[in-house]
Amino acid sequence: MLLIISPSKTQDFAVPIHGDCTQPIFIEQTAQLVRKLKSFDQQQLATLMKMSDKLAAVNHQRFLDFQLPFTPENSRQALFMFQGDQFNPMDVAHYSGEQLVHAQRHLRILSGLYGILRPLDLMQPYRLEMAAKPAVDEAKNLYGFWGERITRAVNEQLAEDPVPVLLNLASAEYFKVIRKKELRANILTLSFKQEKEGCLKTIAIYAKRARGAMVDFVVKNRIVQPEQLQRFAVDGYDFKPDLSADNEWVFVRKLP
């Protein structure tokens, strides 16, 4: 079983290093993207990534400052560096060594700049949404640049599992990069809905937090079988088999 999640725009370079570090598997492709993005001026970056001039200035400088090789001095581990609604429910600072090993084996973070990251992979701060459209080589956008590579990496990881299952906890923007027809695994999407006055809704901020809480649940309990996920009851969520299907499991909680 392999979990995939989206990255976060919020990143904290001040976090300490925890234990072992690994290198991103697509570091050469990342460097290629950075070379391309370095050729953009601040205004071109603002247009490409649909951001303010202030944010464009920050990220323009980040691309200029990008350096290899990645070391604990110039980089931080992905699981600890990402912050925000999805990552905050993960109690990463208190994960044991065994739990970090489990996360490294079973969790992947999709990324516009790095393609796919393991929790302990070193990374440098960046901003590049998967939906951005810098033309690189023959690819017209990042989906074209990363799709085959990421799908191959996921297949290679899942080939080690007797019953390969890709657990989708990513946003639609990021999950789109996976080439489903080429994936040699079953896909199981987890959905988190809120119930109020008899109506069910998916509220983005609550869904992000629930995805992070599910990752935390998997890591802390070192879960390897999808059926074990049905015990998830954090923040009042309950698994609803009557609302679920083979490829989508629904968890619901009531709002006051």
Image (cartoon, grey):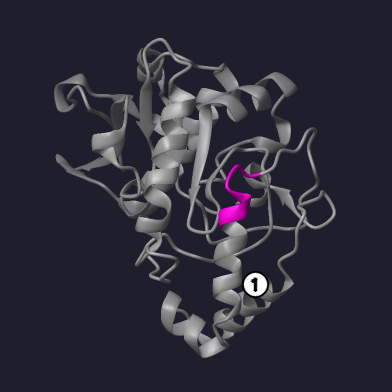
Q: Horizontal and vertical percent for residue 141?
A: 37, 65
Q: Horizontal and vertical percent for residue 244?
A: 19, 26
- Is residue 202 found left or right of 94 in the rendered image? left
Which quarter of the figure is the N terminus placed in? top left
Residue at point 36%, 45% (across, down)? 207
Residue 72 forms part of the magenta stretch: no
Q: Above or below — where is 199 with respect to 137?
A: above
Which quarter of the figure is the C terminus placed in? top left
Q: Above or below — where is 85 with respect to 211?
A: below
Q: Horizontal and vertical percent for residue 144?
A: 35, 57
- In what element is the residue under mark 1? helix
Residue at point 38%, 70% (across, down)? 133
Residue at point 68%, 58% (across, down)? 124
Q: Report the front residue among 57 and 35.
A: 35
Bounds of the magenta segment: 24-29
Q: Quadrant of residue 94?
A: top right
Residue farthest along the right direction in this orientation: 73
Q: Above or below — where is 102 with respect to 111?
A: above
Q: Quadrant of residue 119?
A: top right
Residue farthest along the top direction in this orientation: 162
- Is residue 50 found left or right of 100 in the rendered image? left
